[in-house]
Image (cartoon, rainbow, N blue to C red):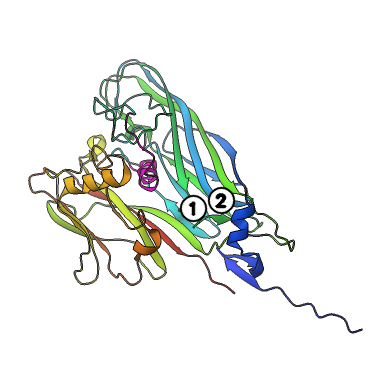
């Protein structure tokens, strides 16, 4: 008998990784997979101003990275003050996977905040059943029971924008979710790791200590502790034919923060969004205006006294959505997310994914020249103002071979 001719199995490229085409079976995958949460590593806090590089283990399908800081603040020999960056701006993060640099880049936090605080804000935007109502924290010397973006399970140690913090040792416990996948239910944007060619790197950019605590009479302020990194992954099951079974992972999920210092002033400000291009879908764009210099910099609250019309614009001058003023934006965010994001934290958000992702997302290829419109009231006294904004997108990671 003639020898059988062996043909090569059709392969499919997903996120730059070759996978047998017949292995892509979302229905069977979700029927057989199992979620598991496991520790990755502990890293000693570097003292601020340093970068911790964490390489994640290559196994299964990655959906979420959880970053926790557990430690203490020690104030010695007098008093000190905390800035608006404390505690949610304790660091920024960057995440790279399978040759895609900056899938997540929160930007480095400054004395005004940012960094991981943007991911905390996004967490409330994505999970409207998550709320900070009733979680009391001190911001600017005021005990607040909403709008803090705090979790009841965490400890800030000392208040944010606090003055006269007395000598002593204070416990700190903070947890941040880094959403590799846009959604853990359908795993859009999750990362396929079941190959030696996968590459995952998480960089933790610690905020310099002088941008977290400043002034006062203290002889020293130290922050010590551990970064705990854990992951949520989904197992890769084996199908009836002995092949692995995976969902459709043709999409990457990206969260990128940008900061604009030029062209922010009283009146209408229009800024073009960075990173536009064909094949990208805009899920949401959110941000805030920072006002003040040095360690006194802080977000402007989203109120009608601070902001006039807020919108996004594309093409020649098409403006699909416009909010009357800051108070209207703040009310919309609170109704949508069950959290007062626009209050003391000053966030705005144009959300295209909260109600119906597939219906409402904005095609960044056809909606050319996307711009943010932010109107700062003329009565607001500005000092070195800057616009911080975050774009959350989904984009094609490859196509079938």
Q: Which image quarter is the C terminus in?
A: bottom right
Work out whether 283 lies above or below 121: below
- Report, in whole angstroms, how far the alpha carbon at label 1 lies from the one at label 2: 8 Å
Q: Position of residue 280 (x, y in %)?
A: 40, 65
Q: Is residue 125 magenta?
A: yes
Work out whether 389 lies above or below 143: below
Name the residue furthest right: 1
The mark tally for this picture is 2
Q: Is residue 346 something one can see in this rendering?
A: yes
Name the residue furthest left: 379
Residues at badges 1 and 2 in contact (C-beta under 8 Å)? yes
Work out whether 299 lies above or below 44: below
Which numbered disc covers residue 240? none
Per the rendered image, the range of residues in magenta is 114-134
> Would residue 158 appear left or right of 302 to someone viewing this image?
right
Which numbered disc covers residue 62? 2
Q: Residue at x 30, y 37 (%)?
A: 111
Q: Position of residue 99 (x, y in %)?
A: 53, 60
Mark 2 packing: few (<14 Cα in 10 Å), some, or many (20+)? many
Q: Which of the 4 quarters of the picture holds residue 174?
A: top left
Q: Residue at x 50, y 51 (%)?
A: 185
> Would residue 159 appear left or right of 9 to someone viewing this image?
left
> Would residue 103 appear left or right of 303 to someone viewing this image?
right
> Would residue 392 appear left or right of 183 to someone viewing this image?
left
Residue placed under numbered mark 1 in the picture? 181
Q: Which of the 4 quarters of the picture holds residue 141?
A: top left
Under circle 1, the secondary element is loop
């Amino acid at each position: 008998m003639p020898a059988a001719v062996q043909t090569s199995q059709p392969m499919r490229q997903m996120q730059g990784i070759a996978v047998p085409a017949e292995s892509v079976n979302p229905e069977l995958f979700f029927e057989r997979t199992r979620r598991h949460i496991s520790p990755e590593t502990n890293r000693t806090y570097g003292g601020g101003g340093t970068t911790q590089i964490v390489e994640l283990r290559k196994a299964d399908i990655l959906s979420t990275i959880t970053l926790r800081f557990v430690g203490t603040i020690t104030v010695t020999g007098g008093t000190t003050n905390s800035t608006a960056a404390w505690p949610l701006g304790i660091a920024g993060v960057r995440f790279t996977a399978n040759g895609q640099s900056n899938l997540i880049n929160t930007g480095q936090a400054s004395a005004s905040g940012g960094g991981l605080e943007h991911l905390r804000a996004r967490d409330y935007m994505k999970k409207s059943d998550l709320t900070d109502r009733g979680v009391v924290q001190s911001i600017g010397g005021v005990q607040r029971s909403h709008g803090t973006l705090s979790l009841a399970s965490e400890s800030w140690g000392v208040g944010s924008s606090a003055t006269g913090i007395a000598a002593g040792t204070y416990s700190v416990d903070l947890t941040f979710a880094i959403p590799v996948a846009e959604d853990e239910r359908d795993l859009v944007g999750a990362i396929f790791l079941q190959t030696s060619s996968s590459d995952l790197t998480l960089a933790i950019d610690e905020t310099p200590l002088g941008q977290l605590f400043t002034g006062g009479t203290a002889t020293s302020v130290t922050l010590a502790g551990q970064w705990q990194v854990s992951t949520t992954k989904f197992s890769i099951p084996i199908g009836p034919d002995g092949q692995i079974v995976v969902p459709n992972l043709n999409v990457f999920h990206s969260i990128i923060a940008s900061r604009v210092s030029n062209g922010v002033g009283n009146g209408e400000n229009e800024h073009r969004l960075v990173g536009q291009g064909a094949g990208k879908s805009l899920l949401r764009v959110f941000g805030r205006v920072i006002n003040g210099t040095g360690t006194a910099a802080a977000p402007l609250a989203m109120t009608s006294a601070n902001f006039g019309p807020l919108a996004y614009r594309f093409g020649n001058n098409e403006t699909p959505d416009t909010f009357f003023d800051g108070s209207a934006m703040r009310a919309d965010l609170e109704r949508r997310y069950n959290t007062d994001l626009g209050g003391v934290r000053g966030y705005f958000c144009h959300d295209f994914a909260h109600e119906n992702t597939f219906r409402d997302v904005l095609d960044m290829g056809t909606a050319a020249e996307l711009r943010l419109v932010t109107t700062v009231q003329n009565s607001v006294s500005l000092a070195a103002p800057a616009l911080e904004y975050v774009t959350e997108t989904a984009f094609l990671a490859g196509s079938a071979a």
